[in-house]
Amino acid sequence: MLAYAGGDLLAFETLYRRHRGTLYRFLLRSLRHRADADELFQESWSRLVAARERYRPEAKFTTWLLQIAHNLVVDRFRRQRPQASPEETETVLRSLDAPESEQPERALSEFEQRRRLQLALEELPEEQRIAFLLRVEGGLGLEEIGEITGAGRETVKSRLRYALARIRARFQA
């Protein structure tokens, strides 16, 4: 990011290639509507471009990028909380991860597991879902999640613990 801020346009391409998947998955699972995720994906990169000269490497780049995305998600929820049906979520997940030439029963089992996880995520309160996605999708630590969400370390731990307990309960049901 420092190279890009200094004018190296190839550095932006590297950043984009490395982080686009993590950013998009976070947005898609946070918002549940592909159109909203697409919009905020573009907006996140636009904000990154606009803020490149103000970037300071005080945290990991991923933390900074996901902070931008999280703020956009929060703004979107404040304006209007989107709701996706399980069928819409299923369609999006299927289009993202369509198995190629696997055995049909294995593909169905993996699809069912992904669907159950998505449904479990949809049932989580927003704070727990965001913390869980930042941890699992973003690979962030407690402090980094706290920086992004504005919550303390212990609050983040609690949110993750409750999210995991709810997801486990959903899978056991």
Image: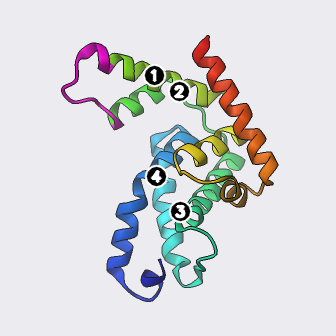
Write down the residue under mark 1: 113
Q: Closer to the N terminus: mark 3 or mark 4?
A: 4
Q: Which mark is residue 26?
A: none
Query: Is the Cβ of the residue at disc 4 closer than 8 Å to that at disc 1?
Result: no
Magenta stretch in the rendered image: 96-107
Query: Is the Cβ of the residue at disc 2 closer than 8 Å to that at disc 1?
Result: yes
Q: How far apart are the alpha carbons under marks 1 and 3?
A: 27 Å
Q: Is residue 70 visible?
A: yes
Question: Residue type at mark 2?
Answer: Leu
Residue at image location 25% in from the left, 15% down from the top: 104
Question: Residue type at mark 1?
Answer: Gln
Question: Residue type at mark 4?
Answer: Thr
Q: How far apart are the alpha carbons under marks 2 and 4?
A: 17 Å
Q: Say left or right for 47 vs 13.
A: right
Which element type, helix, strand or loop, lies under badge 4? Answer: helix
Q: Quadrant of residue 112?
A: top left
Q: How far apart are the alpha carbons under marks 3 and 2?
A: 24 Å
Residue at image location 55% in from the left, 43% down from the top: 136
Q: Position of residue 73 (x, y in %)?
A: 62, 51
Q: Nearer the viewer, residue 140 or 40?
A: 140
Write down the residue under mark 2: 117
Residue at image location 52% in from the left, 47% down from the top: 26
Query: Is the Cβ of the residue at disc 3 closer than 8 Å to that at disc 4?
Result: yes
Q: Closer to the N terminus: mark 2 or mark 4?
A: 4
| Relative height, residue 78 to residue 150 (above, below) | above
Write down the residue under mark 4: 22
Q: Residues within 10 Å of mark 3 (few under 14, many from 20)?
A: some
Write down the residue under mark 3: 62
Q: Position of residue 3 (x, y in %)?
A: 43, 83
Which element type, helix, strand or loop, lies under badge 3? Answer: helix
Q: How far apart are the alpha carbons under marks 4 and 1?
A: 20 Å
